[in-house]
Amino acid sequence: MSRVALVTGGTRGIGAAIAMALRNAGYKVAATYAGNDEKAQAFHGVTGIAVYRWDVTDYDACGAGIAKVEAELGPVEILVNNAGITRDAMFHKMTPQQWHEVVNTNLSGLFNMTHHVWSGMRDRSFGRVINISSINGQKGQMGQVNYSAAKAGDLGFTKALAQEGASKNITVNAICPGYIATEMVLAVPEKVMKERVLPQIPIGRIGDPEEIARCVVFLAADDAGFITGSTITANGGQFVV
Ligand code: NDP
């Protein structure tokens, strides 16, 4: 019987690559999104992957959404907390709204989602929680105090929860991508990319979403059960931890 994997923000960017890679690896996949129906329906049309709309900042909506996924596909055994946003500003100009939106989505979203699948994973003595953090949670990034704080928080969440899940065969791990070719990164002007971004990356290129998806498939596997509380750093050598 194939396991059910739920990927938040799974309809575009890195999340879409994760959802497809898990589907190709034999999982039943649910991909969630916040509001971009057009992208989500196009993704569903091309891949056949089930898509669900709710906001990860809303605890009750996460509970209701997960209940619907479980009724339709079965219990969620692999949860990939991938949904994330940026609201960049230098700290002296950052508004409380920019702070809270980013922390609510990128950090509290992990609580809101994971809390609703945790009891089931404990009851079944199996689970995989995979959190997509960021290089900027490891090293800090000017203009992203909110995002860096939330992504660093994801790593603390991962390490603490890993210790709680271990006796129940639930692993909790994180992945820290560097620059990955998603819409946001591809929108960076070519000149800036060539002169400012690429020189920071020893490997000489930005990463592909599929390279992050590969890490997720590895961590999701039944035989990855001895790996927990860890972080996979995938950034082309830009920041060596
Ligand atoms: P995208 O902006 O391409 O996609 C974000 C996805 O998350 C969309 O599906 C979006 O839904 C969904 N989403 C956003 N907010 C919410 C919310 N409140 N509730 C539910 N879903 C939400 O992101 P990326 O693929 O670039 O990034 C994916 C993850 O990887 C993020 O956590 C990001 O921080 C992290 N990351 C990305 C890097 C990069 O270079 N791209 C580098 C390091 C980390 P909708 O389509 O409806 O808006």
Image (cartoon, helix red, strand yellow):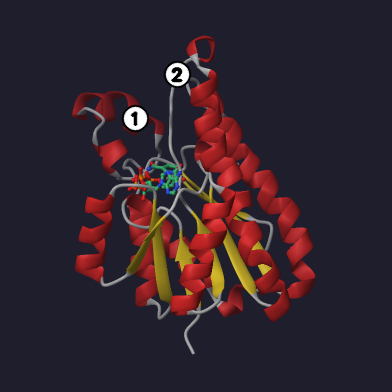
According to the picture, the residue beneath numbered tag 1 turns out to be 197
Q: Is residue 168 left or right of residue 148?
A: right
Identity, as a three-letter code, of the amino acid under mark 1: Val
Q: CA distance from mark 2 to mark 1?
A: 19 Å
Where residue 63 sits: x, y (%)?
A: 57, 60
Please report the residue visible at 45 percent of the width from the left and 56 percent of the height from the top. Answer: 8
Say which of 224 and 55 sits in front: 55
Identity, as a three-letter code, of the amino acid under mark 2: Ala
Quarter of the image for the C terminus: give it: top right
Q: Residue furthest top?
A: 92
According to the picture, the residue beneath numbered tag 2 turns out to be 89
Q: Is residue 212 visible?
A: yes
- Asked whether disc 2 touches disc 1, contact meaning CB atoms under 8 Å apart, the reply is no
Q: Is residue 213 above or below residue 148?
A: below
Q: Is residue 106 left or right of residue 120?
A: left
Where residue 185 sits: x, y (%)?
A: 31, 37
Q: Is residue 21 left or right of residue 96?
A: left
Where residue 139 sits: x, y (%)?
A: 57, 32
Q: Is residue 199 above or below residue 46?
A: above
